[in-house]
Amino acid sequence: MTNTNESVLLELDGAVARITLNRPDKRNALNADVIAGLKRHLRTASQNEEVRAVIITGAGDDFCSGADLSALQKIASASVEDNLDDARSLMELFHLIREIQLPVIAAVRGRALAGGCGLATACDIVLTTRTARFGYPEVKLGFVPAIVMAILRRNVSEKRAFEMVTLGAEVSADEAERTGLINKVFEDENFDDEVETYVRRFAKLSRSAVSLSKSLLYQIDGLAFPDALQTGADVNVVARMTEDCKEGVARFLKRK
């Protein structure tokens, strides 16, 4: 594990890389250091051939409460150029989560609000405790959850997305699951074990197959139907040529 004084920690445990937001006294609020740390550790995990999945979680009682006070003060007083740089940094983080070859799983306990909800939404999979809370309250500050909007719109219905970003209300984990914002809800007392069991499933799977599946799923978004089919055919050919596929087919035929 990296230095425990850092705002974001990385622990490599065989097939799983665990990235922890480490500001529990600030409810793991986002600032420039946290965003930079997340990007750095995601790249490190992606470059490790043993890693099959990444977990992003928060230390303490909450996942992430959004931007911290200093970041909000910066928004209010910064120049257009400074605000643009700040917005682009968060945009790069969300894009990186989709770009790296590994599945990225948000493990949420407590509150995931504003930018924290955006961070969870940007992940490929979201697992939560039953008592977790989600929401985009930015509108209450005259602000907009703008960068995550493209991802949120792809996760839930248009009407549900409109309701979430314009009313700014918090929703329960059960409601978030019903709307498609999250994947699974686990009981609080079993959460760590359930997350570990869930994520370890990726350790038994082909890294190349999971990577190609993730890439294709996001690549075909927005393509015309014939183009999406053609892209799928191209990836199908690439998958057939991988060592994992050749070995998997050989094992299957041997069993038969």
Image (cartoon, rainbow, N blue to C red):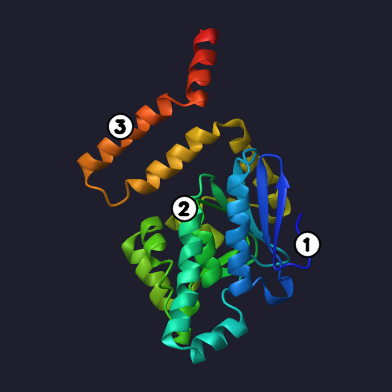
Judging depth in this view, the residue of 158 and 34 nearest the camera is 34
Query: Which mark, residue 233?
Result: 3
* Residue contact between numbered discs 1 and 2, judged by CB atoms under 8 Å: no
* Residue contact between numbered discs 3 and 1, judged by CB atoms under 8 Å: no
Q: Nearer the N terminus, badge 3 or badge 1? A: 1
In which quadrant of the rendered view does residue 199 lie?
top right
What residue lies at 44% left-to-right and 54% top-to-bottom?
180
The amino acid type, in three-letter code, at marker 3 is: Ala
Judging depth in this view, the residue of 217 and 191 nearest the camera is 217
Rendering coords of residue 123 (x, y %): 51, 55
* Callout 2: SS: helix
Mark 1, residue position: 3
Q: How busy is the neighbourhood of tag 3: few (under 14 within 10 Å), some, or many (20 plus)?
A: few
The amino acid type, in three-letter code, at marker 1 is: Asn
The amino acid type, in three-letter code, at marker 2 is: Arg
In this rendering, the answer to whether 246 lies above or below 156 is above
What residue lies at 26% left-to-right and 48% top-to-bottom?
223
View extreme (bottom): residue: 77
Query: Which mark, residue 252?
Result: none
In this rendering, the answer to whether 91 lies above or below 229 is below
Q: How busy is the neighbourhood of tag 2: few (under 14 within 10 Å), some, or many (20 plus)?
A: some
What residue lies at 67% left-to-right and 73% top-to-bottom?
27
Query: Which mark, residue 98?
Result: 2
Judging depth in this view, the residue of 169 and 4 nearest the camera is 4
